[in-house]
Amino acid sequence: MPEPMAPAHEEGGMLCRVGRLWRPVGAVVLLSVLFCGGASLLHEWWASQTVRAPQTSLDRFGVKLAVNGGVIRSASERGARIWACVPEPSFTVQRASQDTTSYALRVLNVQTAALRLRTDMQARLQHLGRTEAILEIAFDDDRPHEIACEYPAETKARFSFGMFSDTSGRDAYAVLPPVMRDFASRQVRFVFSVGDTVGQAGYRLRTRWGVRLFDAYIRMAQTPVYYVIGDNDLAGHLADSALPWTSQYGPNNRSFSFGSAHFVILDSSWRTLSEHTLQWLAEDLERAKGQQSFIFMHVPPFDPRPDRNDGLRDPAADRFMDVVGRYPGTHIYSGHLQIRADWERAGCLLHITGTAGERVRDANPGPNAYSRVVAEYDQGRVTNIRVSDGLPGPLSLLMWRLRFVYPIWLAAHAWEAVGSLAASVLLVVSLRRRRCRDTLTAQLG
């Protein structure tokens, strides 16, 4: 007597059960991808509508405040947090309410050693660390008052400053700590990050993780860091702008003098310079005539490699050199190319700082792949010293990625991933329950 045939669903055993499970799992994955893509586009659109412009003035909480050389990151009834983007910021303060008797300005990114105040009102500077101070203001009238931060003249005659570039790669999280500690050991007066600092700033600077990360690096350097915007620092997708950057670190184009040296930060992130920018640069350099000028821009005016042209687009490069060439001896520091180079053109000295985290593009980088520049200034004389580092170890890379890279991503995109997965699961469960209900109704009917 033949044995009864096993039901079809039992013949395959485990394979059959896996086959039945594959469909809902595949549906969840597919729907999650679709939902996550749509959520990302929606997120970028929302971010493009909510990014705030750089705030340099305040008229709230009974206080009128204007900042010259910095941006206001936050403010409350007790005080305001200010990011300084020049060594010697200044403030105009005025009491707008009789109930206001005092106000505190927490100034970040200043070198507190030897910093002094010049003002005609009651104000006291309290040092919280080497790069952070609190300016306590006491009001006794309703007039506007000027408060200027200044350094003694002897500290401006001879000093050093550092430069690094292209740290938006994942390796930078492991490369930057020793770089910053080296700057601290050399006691540089300030440091310039010559572009491509954070990468995809559109979402990184909208998270506390991203902002805290680079504030932490500044504390490692124990000196102010001035950021030059690069092409990778622009916000991505629909929010493709510099607003997330400038709201945290100040205007794209700015300049300041420190003793007999003049420093210019220039925005070349779009590989071009507008007519307005060139006019501003010409007027700024003319005002600083007689001083030693330094220009920091991410994309260099020219590419020194004979087979590549990744500098400014024509005719911006030639027009830039027409302006700068009127002041021979000007030093121009750039990044972007991720190589190391120094050459002279039109009487000006051009330098590519190398890379401090991005992929090295030097033909023969050798064991010291990453590099930066330290410039020593002594009453008009400039000496550039190139400092190189080896590759970080795999354990160091993993540690810094776990500490910063992945938390930044999760802080920006966790709601998209988790929300999309939850929506997909609910949709698949709902559809399967509906199918089961329809099947049961058909059998009973």
Image (spheres, helix red, strand yellow):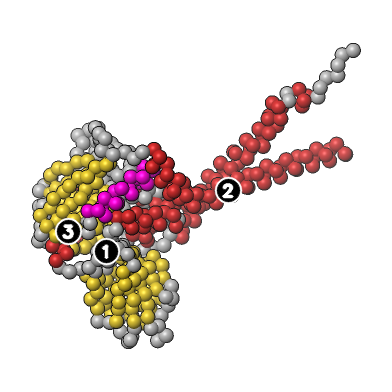
> Which residue has dot 3 on it?
159
Asked whether, in this view, residue 84 is left or right of residue 235, the answer is left
Q: Is the Cβ of the residue at disc 2 closer than 8 Å to that at disc 1?
A: no
Range of residues picked out in magenta: 167-186
> Which residue has dot 2 on it?
418
Crowding around mark 3 (Cα neighbors within 10 Å: few <14, some 14 to 19, many 20+) is: some
* Residue found at x 25% / y 34%: 366
Q: CA distance from mark 3 to mark 2?
A: 51 Å
Q: Nearer the viewer, residue 385 or 231?
A: 385
* Residue found at x 41% / y 62%: 52
* Residue found at x 57% / y 45%: 35
* SS at mark 2 in the image: helix
Instruction: Report the mark closest to the observer, 3 or 2.
Output: 3
Instruction: Report the mark closest to the observer, 2 or 1.
Output: 1
Q: Nearer the viewer, residue 188 or 144?
A: 188
> Which residue has dot 1 on it?
111
